Image: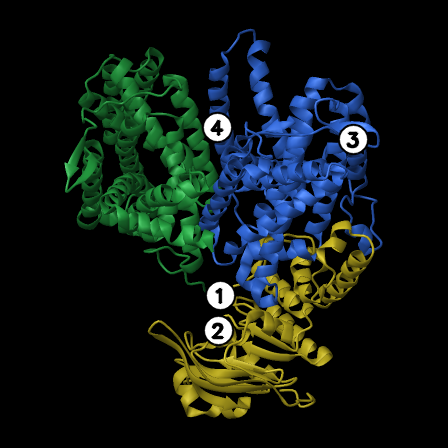
Chain colours: A yellow, B blue, C green
Amino acid sequence: MNETRNIGDTLLKVDNISLSFGGVKAITGVSLEIREREICAIIGPNGAGKTSMLNVINGFYHPQEGTITFGGEVRKQMRPHLAAQGGIARTFQNVALFTGMSTLDNIMTGRNLKMKKNFLWQAINIGPARKEELEHREFVERIIDFLEIEAIRKTPVGRLPYGLQKRVELGRALAAEPKLLLLDEPMAGMNVEEKEDMCRFILDTNDEFGTTIGLIEHDMGVVMDLSDHVVVLDHGEKIADGVPDVVRADQNVIDAYLGVAHE
Amino acid sequence: MLYREAGQYKTNYADDQAIFPLKQDRWLMAIALVVAFVVIPLTSSEYMLQAVIIPFLIFALAAIGLNLLAGYCGQISLGTGGFMAVGGYAAYKFTTSFPDLNMIVVFLLSGIIAAFVGIMFGVPSLRIKGFYLAVATLAAQFFLQWLFNKVAWFYNYNPSGTITAPPREMFGVMITGPNASAEARYMVTLVIVVVLALVAKNLTRGHIGRSWMAIRDMDIAAEIIGIRPLHAKLSAFAISSFYCGVSGAMFVFLWLGSVETEAFAITVSFQVLFMVIIGGLGSILGSFIGAAFITAVPILLTNAPQFFGFNMPIDLQKHFEVMIFGVLIIFFVIVEPHGFARLWQITKEKLRLWPFPY
Amino acid sequence: MEVLNTIFVLPFLDMADSPIFFAEVVVSGLLTGVLYSLVALGFVLIFKASGVFNFAQGAMVLFAALTLVGLMKAGLPLWAALALGLGGAYSLIKNLQQGSRNGVLLSGAVIALAIVGSFPGLPIWMALIITAGLMVVLAVAIEKLVLRPLVNQPDIILFMATIGITFILEGFGETVWGSDIHRLDVGIPDVPIDVAGMLLSTFDMWAAAIGAAMVAGLALFFRYTVIGRALRAVADDHQAALSVGIPLKTIWIVVWSVAGIVGLVAGIMWGTKSGVQFSLSLIALKALPVLILGGFTSIPGAIVGGLIIGVGEKVAEIYWGPLVGGAIENWFAYMLALVFLLFRPQGLFGEKIIERV
């Protein structure tokens, strides 16, 4: 936990969200708040509804009940492009990179919302469109620098090993300069070194750019070290919400998820 | 050894992003352009131009159009013939209604009309994907073909139902109509195709191209990043149809001179689709290669038997042609689904090392 | 106002005016619809089992019909009989060496086909058997040469491959039997008879009956036989089916053969109605709207879809066609499918597509 983090007011609030698919209830009456510049971890056993919650925030799933408050607006359903325009970026559990493109191009697509010059300018590629492209290229190169992936910038992402793909995906999310960065199991399948690198990137992002982070993760060490605020979901319901130390000691959480160390 | 990057450093992003970053590639392109602009018109026969080179260029343009839609944006379309027809008939109506309008302007306007029609038939792509979309585009194909056949206004009430390119000049040279020389028509075609190919390449390298590819690869992730599927897909349909429309206009005015709707039938849609697949989906160069291939094969087949010393009756030739296409398609699709463009890329990569093993 | 009246009011008044004629049109449409359903069925079978959209179905229909007609008239041309015979002999020897019993049987069948087929003027039942046999051989060839190398490729690639097959079949068929229109006579007269005041064609009714019988038979086959169950398993999940020991190869051969035979029946029906010619393969395209309405994987859907399209087309052509110069049939089915797709992207019976991230 980082005491020097300057945590602000509520950035995102979801109230009493319920989501079901046909007869299956994915989320039941969950409310949570994420404040500016904090790192909030959402944890819980598999099938608890964590990814579904992120999907609701992104606007990919539409909840049957509840509201989402972001950027001062209260909505019953979020729409993907509104979420993106509002500054929410996302990585996915199963890496969702654009496999037909290179690393550089993938991260450049993250800049898409900021590219304003219309297609006629792009068609001739002299002047305004070109300038814009080069400016964004510079920004993206800084991200590539930050994530230490210069060597693979022209490689088609389909050919990259899993760990690097996850890093590229982070890069794509960062390229959008998000206010809120939602990461779905960013360290899944990584070894210790890669995890340390990833942690460092996440912390640096939060430190340098003041990005708020929402994080789904199973590695308890990471969760307890990094986060300011932990929310625990189980079977679609919230069973704990608070600072890591408190949550770690909560009996419900221990029963449902953490377990006890046996002597 | 000849084809190396060593020693070619890029010191700024602009250089790195050039279309042909390698010097050798730039030389190749320069040579190709010289050949196209100077050598060919001076040395080719009327027959070569009319039967091979002009149709190659025109179909290459249509292939680029389809490639933008299917290769870069991943939306299958079987309506290419229909959109070409829109271009052809629009050009005819424009130039017969406004005879003083410059032909280039006519072509561009026809393209724009085709773009609008493309947007209309592209709207379903927002809800429908994959094969279902192919069927929607079939609706476009059959409907448009029927429309230009039945509604006499399109062919100016000509009883034969055909449209004929009226003679038009540009800079004092006759470029359409029966008196336009093959060289003149070739040069106009060449200029239009080169310019539009460059534009296409620029579009695919910019953010609109990336948004197309993002939609193609993973439309859900694309949407969550903020790429609007509506804009991306409709722009792909619009621009693709523009290219097909211009191609169709040139088809009538700069190549055949006179067509009926049958010329834009579903077989054309399939032909262009083959060009794109054989040439390589998602590659501008591939569109050219594919077009060259498909234009060349019938010519080869017509002339090959004589070369070998025996004569094949015409309809047997046609049947063989059809069969060989079939075999080629299957062959390519099994051996190299990414088409000639990928083979070319692999060759270039091997050439980088040649003659050294690694 | 006048225009609206003409489009939205008059045709219905026409229908009400002479209801018997309307009924005839509807029934005629239904009968055509059954034939569409048959062709669509071939698609559904293959799509269900191997996930491939077999564009070649139309060409298979054409090829089957051509073969049938050709056999009845002139028998296999000598070179074809020789090729088939030699090929069969080669295959027979190889399979004897490997001890593959199925292979031996198949090769023997091919040789028998070649010998019998080379005699001209075969009676129809013999020609039917031979053609059916040839379609099975074709199915095996397609599976081995085209499908297997393409096992994991994306849909569009498979689609292109089947287009390639279409071209080969068309070209080949026309090379062997020529491209004239052939008359096909299956012994069912095409005389109109009076049913409840409507004039219907006997042939159409026979065609519908046969079509319906085939469809019913296939539906029962899928539900109640071991192979049928295996087919449904394969349609659901290739890997899972493999892992429970279902022989994928055999299943595919069965499916393509059945599709080929369905194609043959459809080819006979269409061929007798309008002559066996090139444009028969365009029927394949017509099946697409049927598949859209009915869903790509549903047998009842193919039936219902075919009927709806058949009736829709006919009615549109007769009652609205004259308003715009006719030939609406060319595009009506596709437009209908398009409009339908806008409201229900998965078709009438298809499974709802749920996307997960």
Q: CA distance from mark 3 to mark 1?
A: 57 Å
Residues at marks 2 and 1, common chain?
no
Q: CA distance from mark 3 to mark 4?
A: 44 Å
Across and down, in percent, residue C74 comes to 28, 13
Q: CA distance from mark 2 to mark 1?
A: 9 Å
**Residue marked by disc 4:** B327
- The kind of residue on which mark 3 rests is Glu
The answer to whether residue B130 is above or below residue B105 is below
Q: Residues within 10 Å of mark 4 (few under 14, many from 20)?
A: some
**Residue marked by disc 1:** C357
Element on which disc 2 rests: helix
Residues at marks 2 and 3, common chain?
no
Q: Residues within 10 Å of mark 3 (few under 14, many from 20)?
A: some
Q: Which dot marks residue B169? A: 3
Across and down, in percent, residue C243 comes to 32, 51
Q: Is residue B339 visible?
A: no
Q: CA distance from mark 4 to mark 2?
A: 47 Å
